[in-house]
Amino acid sequence: MFSVVVLISGGGSNLRALLTAAASPLYPAKVVAVGSDKAATGLEHAEEFGVPTFVVEPSRFESREAWAEVLLSNIEFHKPDLVVLAGFMRVLPANIVNQLSPRMINLHPSLLPDFPGANAVADTLAAGATVTGATIHIVDEGVDTGKVLTQVSIPVALGISETDLQEQIKLVEQEQLVQAVQDIATGALVLAEKEHNA
Ligand code: GRF
């Protein structure tokens, strides 16, 4: 069975959607572990579904690289076919990206390349955009710069608050994530070949 490790930092609504889909015997992927950089509330979803969790906090390490090594060991212990960053709010250093790319995808609440970074929804509203959306992309060493796999557009309602728009995007993302993982697992969506520069 195609196996997935999910990394989160927050409430984990996207994680929950994937866990719910994967509970069906017809779904072609299984969530084998959920990791976080802190005691995120979303870890409760994993516990509810009987999926093991791990927390690796950067503040306990001398460098980002040392933190990432331990995070990587925890991920690789579960031998995943795919790693999903679902609201994981840390930029991963090169050592972990090189090891996992292109088998690592990220959800981002905008139509990339527009509005990368941690404040995408606020930036979208501040720019007065009338259309936004959700992107799933391969993680590379940049911030939200990897190859785009799927995008869904959403109109921005006049006067909508940041919180409401974020929630609207999350609903779209949940469906998009379940579909993308299914398509990657079945081979309908092919991840880019890893480039070897050396
Ligand atoms: C999502 O909107 C994702 O795009 C962004 O963080 C949010 C995570 O939401 N990176 P949740 O924790 O899955 O509810």
Image: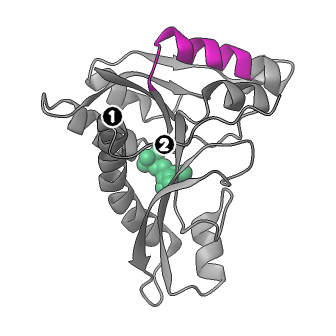
Residue 86 numbered tag: 2
Q: Label 2 crowding class (10 Å Cα cut-off): few <14, some 14-19, many 20+?
A: many
Q: Is residue 115 above or below residue 159?
A: above
Q: Is residue 78 left or right of residue 187?
A: right
Colouring mode (rainbow / by chain / secondary structure / one colour) = one colour
Q: Position of residue 150 (x, y in %)?
A: 44, 58
Q: Which residue is mark 1?
A: 185
Q: Position of residue 22 (x, y in %)?
A: 24, 32
Q: Position of residue 23 (x, y in %)?
A: 19, 29
Specify whether tag 2 is near ligand 1 (CB below 8 Å). yes
Quadrant of the snapshot with the N terminus: top left
Query: Which residue is situated farthest in the top direction here?
Result: 77
Instruction: Give the main secondary structure of the magenta stretch.
Output: helix
Is 148 a magenta residue? no
Q: Is residue 81 left or right of residue 69?
A: left
- Taking the spot 29% from the left edge, 41% from the top edge, the residue there is 182
Assign a secondary structure to mark 2: loop
Of 197 and 124, the residue lying toward us? 197
- Taking the spot 43% from the left edge, 29% from the top edge, the residue there is 43
Identify residue type, mark 1: Ala
Of 182 and 159, the residue lying toward us? 182
Q: What range is drawn magenta here?
A: 68-81
Marks 1/2: CA–CA distance: 17 Å
